[in-house]
Image (tube, rainbow, N blue to C red):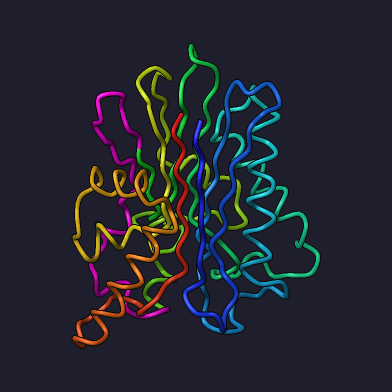
Amino acid sequence: MRIELATVPGTPERPNEDWVSVALPASGQGGTLVVLDGVTPPKGDDGCVHGVPWFTARLGGALVELSGSRRDLTLTEILAEAVRRTADTHRGTCDLSHVRTPQATVVMARWGAAADAVEHLVLSDSTLLLESPGGRVRAVLDDRIDRLPRESLLTHASADALRNAEGGFFTAAADPGVAVRAVTGSTPRAEVRAVAALTDGASRWVDMFAEGGWTECLALLRKEGPQGLIDRVRALEESAKERTAVIRWKLHDDAAAVFAEL
């Protein structure tokens, strides 16, 4: 088994709000990966005294612990419990009803022995890739945010009206009920050769710069590793800046990627 991961902040002046981890049981008969992309609020406007990196670290830690120790729970149930635990740690000090309370996108994958399945969960706009033994790559996406009118996301106020709301998009924040909104499924273990997960700062190589499709992206991860993919994204961003090309949202975003060859 080969596992590689990397995460890089968008700028050195700000803490990295992405979070990535992989855990393998002592038996060696499976594993779990978790990738989170923290949602950056307007400065000082989220009702929380802790901040997004604090939130992603605690939510991510709970997800890894539960997905590894509670095989009796589905990934949906694990996400709900992890959100509940994390909310309880700062319920007494922070306004968890604030629409911008710390939150994150979520990608999870869990696999067992050869006869088991590879389970997956995706919430919001991070990406999970599943590669078959024959090389076919399937992208698992929660595309609700992409189906919204672009103009509805251009201001904080309009985006807030769609955040964790019917007809909008969903992220893991303080409400465990959001877990049922995630895209979930499972694939027979024998039909998965490799798994990869990317936050949108890393998936720009495909969905912003169109350097290749998901199949080519996974091949790049296999050849150069997650850091190689992120380095290529940074080079593309700098080139776009020099050409005064338009980059949505911000020039550099926090980026995280993990590649696991099962």
What range of the chain is rendered magenta?
130-156
Foreground pick, 7 / 158: 7
Residue 51 in the figure: left or right of residue 200: right
Q: Residue furthest top?
A: 115
Toward the front, the furthest residue is 223
What residue is shown at x 38% (from left), y 66% (from top)?
Answer: 231
To which quarter of the image does residue 30 belong? top right
Using the image as rendered, state which of residue 78 and residue 176 is in the foreground: 78
Rendered view: 50 above or below 126: below
Q: Is residue 177 above or below residue 48?
A: above
Question: How far across and how far down the image is residue 156, in percent?
Answer: 42, 78
Q: Position of residue 200 (x, y in %)?
A: 38, 60
When the figure is inspected, residue 198 is found, relative to residue 200, above or below; the finding is above
Q: Position of residue 87 (x, y in %)?
A: 70, 56
User: Foreground residue, 159 or 17?
Assistant: 17
Image quarter for residue 166?
A: bottom left
* 150 sits left or right of 105 in the view: left
**Residue 136 forms part of the magenta stretch:** yes
